Amino acid sequence: MKFDKVRWGIIGCGDVTEVKSGPAFQKINNSELVAVMRRTGELAKDYAKRHDVPKWYDDADELINDPDVDIVYIATPPGSHKEYTIKAAKAGKPVYVEKPMARTFEECQEMIAACEQAGVPLYVAYYRRAQERFLKIKELLANGAVGEVRFVSSTQYQKARKDVLDPERLPWRVQPELAGGGLFYDLASHTLDLLDFLLGPIKSVQGFASNQAGYYRAEDIVTGTYLFESGIHGVGNWCFSAFDDVDVNEIVGSKGKITFSTFENEPIVLTTASGTEQWSFNRPEHVHQPLVETIVTDLTTGSSKCPSTGVTGARTNWVMGEMVKNYYLG
C-alpha cells in the first residue's frame, strides 16, 4: 500500500489534536489533513476553520468512507477504538489509533485481526518511541553504557487531579467502561510501552490494584512486577492520590544506570563508576510529529519504519490488564 501523498482524516478532534497531533499532519512533507469529525458538528466545523481543514463531519462513517481520506486517525476515548478501527479497515483505510490502543487486550487482538484481514497497516500513538530523548536512551543501552541490564524500576505518583473530585462530572479517563481502567491506563501505558521499546517484550506479569482515595470507581493505585523475555526484571508503582508529583525511571545494569522521566523534560542521566553524564532535549512542538513522520514514510515508500504498531500496542494492553485484573475480577 503506497500513496504519493497521505491524506488524513481525524475522528474525535478534541484537545489532544489541537497541538499534540493535528498540526503535525499539515507540516510533514507528503502529508495533509483533509477532514475532521466530531459528534457535535459545530465543534468539528470550528476546528476545521481554525486549522484550515477543508472538510468536517458529525458522522464517523461519512469520514471513514470519504474517498479523499487515505488514513484514519482515531482520537476518541478507548471505548470506541475497536469499532472505528474495524470500520476503517473494512473500508480499506490504514489506521492510526490513540493510546491506550483499546480497553482490553482482547479488543486489541480483534483490531489487529481486522486490519490484517483487510491488508491495511495499524499504528498506535505511542509517540515517545520516535522522540529524540528516548532514542538516545535506546542508543546508550545498545552501546553497552550500563553493561548488562539487570532491572528497571518506575515510580510515578501525583496529587489527585481536581477534575476527579466531582462524582457527577467525572472525566472519561477514570470511567473503566470508556477508558479500560483509570488514570493508570491513560498514563502508565506510556511508561510501559517505553519499557517494551527500550528493553523488549514482557513475558510475565504480576500486579495489585486498589482504590484508596475513593474519588471514583476505577483503580487509583497499581503496583506491578514483571519479567522481560530477555531476563531483565522490572517493578513499577503508580499512585494517583499522593501528596506530590514524582516521575522517575531507572534502568540499572552491571556497569551503571540510566535515570529518566516519562513525562517531564528532565535531562537523561547516565551514572557509572566514571561519574555522570547528562543529555537534554527540547520537547517537540507537536509531540506526535516524529512518529507521524515514520508513518508517512511507510505509506509513501512501502517501508516499515514506524516503531509503534498494533502488535506492540497490544503488548502494553496485555501487561496493564494483568496488573489490574485482581481489582476488576475481585
Image: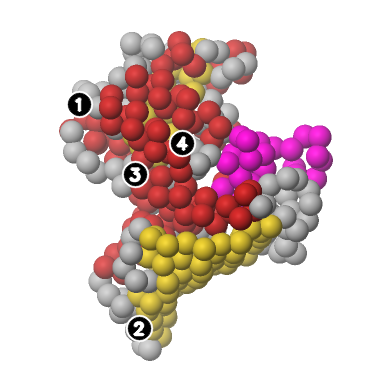
- The Cα–Cα distance between marks 3 and 1, rounded to whole angstroms, is 21 Å
The residue that disc 3 covers is: 311
Q: Which residue is mark 4?
A: 107
How far apart marks 2 and 1 lie (CA) works out to: 45 Å
Residue 113, compared with residue 325, is above or below; it is: above
Residue at disc 2, secondary structure: loop
Q: Amino acid at mark 3?
A: Val
Q: Are marks 2 and 3 in contact (CB under 8 Å)?
A: no
Secondary element at tag 3: helix
Q: Earlier in the sequence, mark 2 or mark 1?
A: 1
Mark 3 or mark 4: whose residue is earlier in sequence: 4
Q: Earlier in the sequence, mark 3 or mark 1?
A: 1
Give me the C-alpha separation between circle 1 and circle 4.
Answer: 27 Å
Q: Is residue 180 magenta?
A: yes
Q: Is residue 181 above or below residue 134?
A: above
Name the mark on residue 327: none
> Relative to the observer, which residue lies in front, 35 or 199?
199
Q: Which residue is mark 1?
A: 2
Amino acid at pointer 2: Ser
Distance in Å between CA atoms under marks 4 and 2: 39 Å
Identify residue for label 2. 254
Q: Which residues are magenta?
A: 162-185
Q: Position of residue 163 (x, y in %)?
A: 75, 42
Q: Residue at x 43, y 34 (%)?
A: 97
Which residue in the rendered view is the most extreme toward the bottom? 273
**Which amino acid, by three-letter code, is at mark 1?**
Lys
Seen at 40% across and 50% down, the residue is 315
